[in-house]
Amino acid sequence: MTAKIFVVTSGKGGVGKTTSAINLGAALNYLNQDVIVVDANLATPNIGLHLGAPIVPVTLNHVLCEKAGIGEAIYEHSSGMKILPSSLSLNEVKKTGYENFRETAKKLKRISDYVIIDTPAGLGGDVSEIINAGDEVIIITNPELPAVTDALKVSKIARELDKEIRGIIITRVKRVKSEMPSANIKEMIEAPIIGVVPEDIAIQQALVMKDAVFHTHPRSKPARAYMEIAARLIGKSYASARQQEALEKAGFFNRVMKALGMR
């Protein structure tokens, strides 16, 4: 199997980009894939914060500045998922650029099945450097015109760099009339919709618990949505949320019947 680098980007902050990167990594790990989630947001990194490890001794910054080897900066979550965080230190931020990022990404690709890179928000040159280091681009957006407009802009950057857009994940979906329909988003960005993640209090609760919602609330709708997306990304079949719920209910019913001696 050939390793692959997914660049998760948005063009706009606050749409669930980091949440998506972490939960896709968690879901891929659950599917027995060796995955590394990289926080390439050197200015305002969030992955360490989301996973309860805001400060670590060696970071991506050290690797990019050639002060440490890549293996020293990779940390394993209790679930088995691996992360490569960036530094919260302002001094480190000032010293670090993206000149060596592409070479670093190549090294990561040699030691993992999948690499998921969380980009900074916005459309600056840094984002172009990161996208250029990836194999496929996953665009995160909310079903609102400003977010979709910025997603369109970042899709143009990816196409200018001749990168494949694997698809769009629409997050924070509330199913209200004011939201843009998925078909309109697909038509505007000219890329397939590979997943829809509903707005859910479980995501905020997971943030407070400092872990992926996939781990803290595995039966929640967002967790199931990320599992379906992850399975789709690697070409594995996975029951839809409704199918999975039905299977769980059937399994519970069969266990009860067996306990009662009726099966």
Image: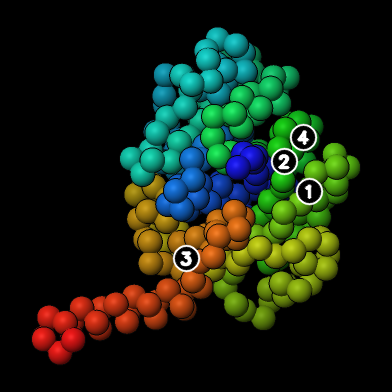
Q: What element carries label 2?
A: loop
Q: Name the residue under label 2.
A: 135
Residue 234 sits above or below residue 96 on the image: below
In-image side of 255 versus 131 (left or right): left
Does any portion of residue 207 appear in the rendered image? no
Q: Name the residue under label 1.
A: 164
Along the line of sight, which residue is nearer the eye, 144 or 190? 190
Along the line of sight, which residue is nearer the eye, 56 or 132? 132
Q: Mark number for residue 132?
A: 4
Q: Mark 3 points at which residue?
A: 224
Q: Residue 123 appears in which quarter of the rendering? A: top right
Whole-angstrom CA distance, mark 1 to mark 2, is 7 Å
Residue type of the residue flagged with mark 3: Arg
Contact, mark 2 vs mark 3 (Cβ under 8 Å): no
Q: What element carries label 3?
A: helix
Earlier sequence position, callout 1 versus callout 2: 2
Q: Which residue is drawn at 60% across and 49% down?
A: 17
Q: Residue at x 66, y 27 (%)?
A: 106
Neighbour tally class for label 4: few under 14, some 14-19, many 20 plus, Cα within 10 Å: many
Whole-angstrom CA distance, mark 4 to mark 3, is 30 Å
Q: What element carries label 1?
A: strand
